[in-house]
Amino acid sequence: MDVIEAVTGRRSVGRLVEPAPGDGELLGLLERAMTAPDHGMLRPWRLVLVRGDARHALAPAFADTVDGTAEERARAAGKPLRAPLLVSIVFTPKPSPKVPEWEQLAATSAMIHTLGLLLHAQGWASIWRTGRVVESGSVRAALALEPAERLLGWLYVGTPDPAQRCAPRAAAAPEAYVSLLRSVGRVDPLVPLAGRR
Ligand SMILES: Cc1cc2nc3c(=O)[nH]c(=O)nc-3n(C[C@H](O)[C@H](O)[C@H](O)COP(=O)(O)O)c2cc1C
């Protein structure tokens, strides 16, 4: 799969079933994902893999995000079971006179997206999920986070559920997000391009 095909074909897949990539395959992809741009090469992340029964360790935190009936809480508690592998994304910003924290967050995001693309290229599927649960004390305790660390959610990883249909991706209108500097303070829209590839 070439890079254009991988980028165009990747979708976030919400329903993921067994199998998931093993630790060895995941580490191989992670090594490549860690080639994403990382100012100062600070590697401001660590990943905690959650598989199998260990996913239940996260259940109380998910249940606690719901202030509702026992049934609603039970449904929320089942959320970590939506994929066979949860890659917990832990942001570990490093003190740096040169690289502010936002840049380290950007680098972490670039690495995670690259990992998602590589998984897709290998036939796996994933979705980055967040929500209020990332702030939960019980989830932080379950994952043994240090006070200065921040949970950025999970990359849920597995095999796409064949029963799930992915809606076609809506076409983007990139011109709406791009303008052209002509001179100081003068920024024009792009002239509509014919035959953009
Ligand atoms: C930082 C981040 C957090 C996300 N959190 C959620 C989430 O909590 N729940 C969810 O369904 N999707 C989440 N997503 C996935 C987006 O909803 C998804 O990428 C978007 O709908 C576009 O779909 P696509 O990836 O198939 O193009 C998140 C994506 C990112 C980058």
Image (tube, helix red, strand yellow):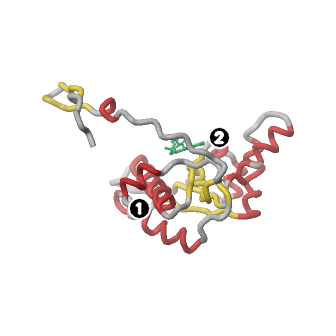
Residue that numbered label 2 is attached to = 132
Residue drawn at x 22%, y 33% as measured from the top left: 194
The picture quadrant where one finds residue 165 is top right
Residue drawn at x 44%, y 57% as measured from the top left: 114
Residue 102 position (above or below residue 171): below
Residue 16 in view, yes or no: yes
| 3D distance between C-alphas at marks 1 and 2 | 36 Å
Q: What's the residue type where badge 2 is placed? A: Arg
Between 13 and 26, the one lying in front of the other is 13
Q: Give the left or right position of residue 16, taking residue 96 as reference.
A: right
SS class of the residue under badge 2?
helix
Q: Position of residue 99 (x, y in %)?
A: 36, 53
SS class of the residue under badge 1?
loop
Q: Position of residue 72 (x, y in %)?
A: 80, 38
Residue drawn at x 77%, y 44% as measured from the top left: 63
Residue drawn at x 33%, y 35% as measured from the top left: 174
Residue that numbered label 1 is attached to = 1
Q: Which mark is residue 77?
A: none
Residue 177 position (above or below residue 24): above
Q: Position of residue 25 (x, y in %)?
A: 54, 71
Q: What's the residue type where badge 1 is placed? A: Met
First along the sequence among labels 1 and 2: 1
Between 133 and 11, the one lying in front of the other is 11
Figure quadrant of the C terminus: top left
